[in-house]
Amino acid sequence: MSMMKRRDFLQISSVAVGATIFGYAASQYASTANVSSTTFKNIALVHADLFDVKAGFPSVSELNSVGYLKGVLQDPKIPIDKKELIINGAVWLDETAQETYSKEYLQLASDERQKLLKEISMLRWGDNWIWTLMSFQFEAMFADPIYGSNLNQSGWKWLAYEPGFPRPNEVAI
């Protein structure tokens, strides 16, 4: 039995550690971001308001669309102005709810939220913000579960969608 040279050991170890870190980072794509939880609660509620579960659309939790959005916010490939729009839009939505109803968006009744979303969709920032959220919602729905969204392939199942092959076996971040 021969002994491994120190140089060979270090090379193999560095590759193993790098692969472990990369694999961990990829699996965590859709899980964390440094933004207030109220912001993400608002975004989750907007997603639910835009895509009605009662009509059969997969839920926010089934798609992990908010978790996916958190990953998007950390992704260096996403333009900063798009990231700012996502966060600022949630803040502006809450401010508009306060101005209109004297309540936070999270405290509004369903019909009030629908009315508010219609109103802000007529404003430039609101239209851009809703469009951006919907784009990422659809991205989360069609993404391979390896990216941390579309859990249990719920978006694919809802659409009877067959993914392309070969499917990814790692996340390139």
Image (cartoon, rainbow, N blue to C red):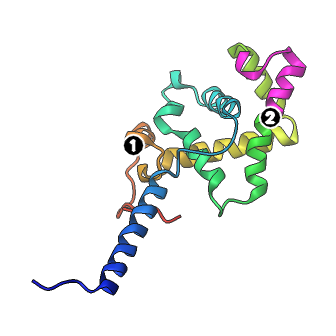
Name above or below for residue 143 compared with residue 126.
Answer: below
Identify the magenta region: 92-107
Does the stretch in magenta take in 98? yes
Which residue sits at x=42%, y=43%? 156
**Residue 70 belongs to the span the image colors magenta:** no
Q: Which class describes the residues within 10 Å of circle 2: few (<14), some (14-19), or many (20+)?
A: some
The tag on residue 91 is 2
- Element type at marker 2? helix
Residue sitting at x 72%, y 43%: 131
Q: State the predominant SS element of the stretch in magenta.
A: helix
Q: Which of marks 2 and 1 is nearer the N terminus?
A: 2
Instruction: Left or right? Give the position of 32 relative to 150.
Output: right
Q: In this view, does 120 lie to the left or right of 12?
A: right
Give percent across and percent down for residue 4. 23, 83
Q: In this view, does 99 lie above or below 89?
A: above
Question: Residue 153 bears which disc, if any?
Answer: 1
| Kind of residue sitting beneath label 2 | Val
Q: In which quarter of the image is the N terminus?
A: bottom left
Residue, x 43% and y 69% (percent of image)?
Answer: 18
Q: Nearer the viewer, residue 1 or 129?
A: 1
Q: Count all numbered tags in the image, as a single digit.
A: 2
Taking the spot 66% from the left edge, 34% from the top edge, the residue there is: 40
Q: In which quarter of the image is residue 153?
A: top left
Query: Between marks 2 and 1, how big is the CA–CA gap?
Result: 31 Å
- Label 1 sits on what residue type? Gln
Residue 164, image quadrant: bottom left
Locate residue 87 relative to residue 5 in the image: left or right: right
Asked which secondary structure carries label 1, the reply is helix
